[in-house]
Image (spheres, rainbow, N blue to C red):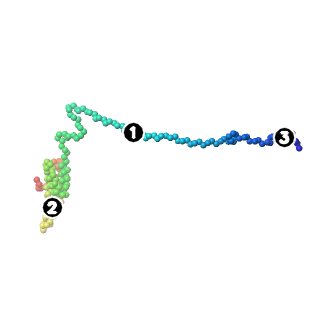
Amino acid sequence: MTTLPPEDQNSSGSAEQPQSPAPPAPGGEAPGNAAPSAPQAPEQPQYQPPQPPVPPQQPQYQAPQQPQYQAPPAGGQAPPSGGYQQPPAGYQQPVADPANTITLNYWLSVFFTWIPALIFYLTEKDKGNPRALAFHRDNLNFSLLRTGIYVIVLIGSFIPYLNFIIVPVAWIAQVVFFVFHIIAAVKAPEAYRTGNAKAFAFNLDLVK
């Protein structure tokens, strides 16, 4: 067995001694570990005063423009105003065409015989148009002629032994006069405009 010298024993013994930990740092903090920081307080929102509402803009007032004065024309005549102007001397209001009245009278008389013919004759009598009045008078005469034939038919139907002759003849005459009245109603307006005197092929002057 080999024995070591005393110096070697002391060195080996000193090497085996454990090292003691370093003393803690002042303040109780372990080395290598930092102390936790304190939590930060939340920031307070900055207070902003409310802004006053913007007042609406006032409409810009524009003064009305003054009408420009125009000097009157030479000769002392005042300019015409924008209102109602008097018609010039000799001006006449437009008058309805008498041919339209004649057309209406004739066509109504075709279906209603003497009633419209008499009304138009009386209304047109005092209007001072002799040519138009002549057409209305002819229409009234022909309407009365048709009415007379119709009366003959009614009376003849009550006469014994004659009704077989009078009634058929009167009815044929009534139809013929009805057709003539239609032809006259078509020709009357043109006859009035062209200056022709008559619209009926034949007539009786019962009213003069």
* Residue at (45, 40) in percent of width and height: 51
| For the residues bearing labels 1 and 3, Cβ distance under 8 angstroms | no
In the rendering, at what x and y percent does residue 44 appear? 54, 42
Query: Badge 1 is on which residue?
Result: 57
* Label 3 to label 2: alpha-carbon separation: 178 Å
For mark 2, give the secondary structure: helix
- Res. 164 image quadrant: bottom left
* Residue at (79, 42) in percent of width and height: 17
- Of the residues tagged 2 and 1, which is closer to the observer? 1
Left or right relative to 72: residue 156: left
Measured along the vertical axis of the image, is residue 55 above or below residue 189?
above
In the rendering, at what x and y percent does residue 136 appear? 15, 52
The label number, if any, that marks residue 9 in the structure image: 3
Earlier-in-chain disc, 1 versus 3: 3
For mark 3, give the secondary structure: helix
Q: Residue furthest front?
A: 27
